[in-house]
Amino acid sequence: MPAWQEARARQIIEAHRTVDGPALVILHALQREFGFISDEAVALVADALNLTRAEVHGIVTFYHDFRREPAGRHVLKLCRAEACQALGGERLAAHGQSRLGITWGGTTADGGVTLEPVFCLGLCASGPAALIDGRPVGRLDAARLDRLLDEVSS
Amino acid sequence: MSARVYLPRDAAALAVGADDVAQALSAAAQRRGVTLEIIRTGSRGLFWLEPMLEVATSEGRVAYGPVEASDAETLLDAILAGGGPHRLRLGPTEAIPFLKRQTRLTFARCGITDPLSLHDYRAAGGYRGLDRALSLGPAAIVETVVESGLRGRGGAGFPTGIKWRTAREAVGQPKYIVCNADEGDSGTYADRMIMEGDPFCLIEGMTIAAIAIGAAKGFIYIRSEYPHAIATMEAALAIARRDGRLGTNVAGSGHAFDIEIRVGAGAYVCGEETALLDSLEGKRGMVRAKPPLPAHRGLFGRPTVVNNVLSLAAVPTILADGADAYRDLGMGRSRGTMPIQLAGNVRYGGLFETAFGVTLGGLVDDIGGGTLSGRPVRAVQVGGPLGAYFPRALFDTPFDYEAFAQRDGLIGHGGVVVFDDTVDMAYQARFAMEFCAIESCGKCTPCRIGSTRGVEVIDRIVRGEKREANLALLEDLCGTLKFGSLCALGGFTPYPVMSALRYFPEDFGARNGAVPA
Ligand SMILES: Cc1cc2nc3c(=O)[nH]c(=O)nc-3n(C[C@H](O)[C@H](O)[C@H](O)COP(=O)(O)O)c2cc1C
Ligand code: SF4
Ligand code: FES
């Protein structure tokens, strides 16, 4: 992820400012570029959309997707919802957490992996399921999850 | 030598290695100097068989699955033999019982055609509905949808035609068509399958809706958890525009209509239609009080139809084949077909589109083949995280809006999640409360605060602390949620909680299984 660049951020905001109801579109675009929504980003968006910083902050924190700090190099989103629970999803999550040494929302000390909960990926007949860096994986078990984590950390 | 095969690019097929299979097959074909055409399709929805490979033969398609990259060489032998023997051969695809027993209207093309080929789409009956709609005109389109009996597939089951009529009669321009593709209910994936496997069907349905109510602009609000659906829909929109099927003069009809995709940001409540509208407007996804109805004052205060993907995707068939053909299927006030999604601990998990009326037991035991683990089925949650948990004793319930409601359940978006006998129902009840606490929009106190209290109370019950008093408190709390909530997130969370308690009291530490009524 590139470091914060105000000029680039302004460009991104400008590119989307005129769509109908632009806030979410802009926030998504900023997070795609910089990996998270910084205080500077909140201030710029507020300025561009004629909102207060508190309002933009309220939007950012309402949505689970938006991060207020950078994620690790890889993001593992593990499904915590019912169909995956029915196939041992919670046990798998416990295994993942203990192997990574973090809980939900945490990032490993080496900055390698961020673990996030997700409530359904639409892979409910192929669970337990996850997204690793946006790539879907299904029929997970502890061994397969370990292999995945080995792959991304190598 | 040359051959043609079909392999899904649906996210659920990718999740179990479909891309690796495609690469391995290409490589094997290249090594042998044969031409292998691999057409990437949506999924047929037989997920226990994914990745499922189909070979084009003179007698139709022959299926193999679940295939792995390491099977590439032997599969290629079978492919080149024109659908020859292989240990993973399933026979002619259409003869697989799970498929053969379905009535596929909405999913008629999904898994068969190349999702991004307009030519395939047309050849397989696509755009017949729009042609018919254009010849009927707006008022008659609306009446056709009313007569079909189609009800909203997003959960609430509101008659689609009535909603359209209201928006059509509403004064004020512009008007909007909003497709709800937030598909937040766990155990559901039919919207995703349509968007990835037959995107033009949704575009056609939205176009018909737009003409019916006089809208020039549509939005599809897709959850961010669906990156593949977003990409396929974007690509399909671009193709439709290029072909003049969207734009200032749709299919030469003089109607202007275009569609924009908006991506959600991981909030379950944004599936609720008014929260979705707020989110589309770039705000926090707060539920609005009704009235005003979105059909009167919706997106940016304008008349708006909000419909689920499946409601809109059912429309082309209804227009093409007539209201009667659709209405003749089903039972009671549930007309037509429902794409039911079997999920969780189920042997044959997948998409089963059928006329309303099939029993829950038939779905789980017969069609689903029981659990994947091979253990007894103990509980089934129908209708997503706000749906009730049903025990075997309720397996005679027919799949029908009213029949489920009568038993304090709901069919919702058609997800059926199966659990075996290792499930801890007190844990499931606790999770329902926890989920409500995490996803609450915060507008109503019972939902925002009461759900967290609910988690604590269930913990105390399970620990055996003042059991009777805490059980009474839990029931009280559920009553407050049910009657003091603006939307179904708070209002229906009592369903999974109370059904778990009612049908599985032994998991809540009841010694003799009895729970106060
Ligand atoms: C908390 C909550 C979440 C919902 N999630 C969805 C959803 O993900 N998709 C959907 O189509 N409808 C969802 N609904 C139902 C919508 O509010 C609305 O009824 C539906 O989009 C209308 O379309 P339909 O008539 O075609 O079903 C949800 C409702 C609530 C209360
Ligand atoms: S019930 Fe919950 S989610 Fe629904 S409006 Fe009230 S606080 Fe928001
Ligand atoms: S419940 Fe896990 S993918 Fe749907």
Image (cartoon, coloured by chain):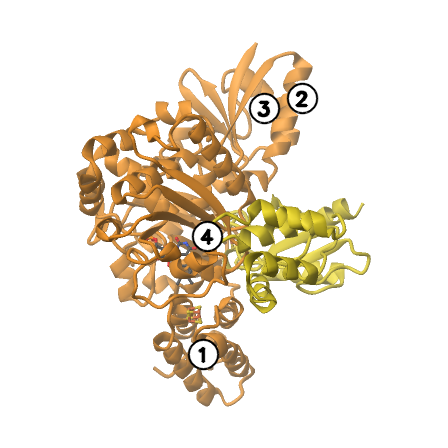
Chain colours: A yellow, B orange
Residue B227 appears in the rendering:
yes
How many marks are shown on the rendered structure?
4
Specify whether tag 1 is near ligand 2 (CB below 8 Å): yes
Query: Quadrant where the C terminus of chain B lies?
Result: bottom left
Q: Is residue B466 above or below residue B7?
A: below
Q: Amino acid at mark 2?
A: Ala
| Secondary element at tag 4 | loop
Q: Amino acid at mark 4?
A: Asp
Q: Which mark is residue B75?
A: 3
- Give the residue at mark 4: B182
Which tag is nearer the camera, tag 2 or tag 3?
A: 2
Specify whether tag 4 is near ligand 1 (CB below 8 Å): yes
Q: Are marks 1 and 3 in contact (CB under 8 Å)?
A: no
Q: Is residue A59 left or right of residue B515?
A: right
**Callout 4 and callout 2 share a chain:** yes
Image coordinates of residue B111 in percent, x first then y, are: 44, 33
Specify whether tag 3 is near ligand 3 (CB below 8 Å): no
**Callout 4 and callout 1 share a chain:** yes
Which tag is nearer the camera, tag 1 or tag 3?
A: 1
- Give the residue at mark 2: B27
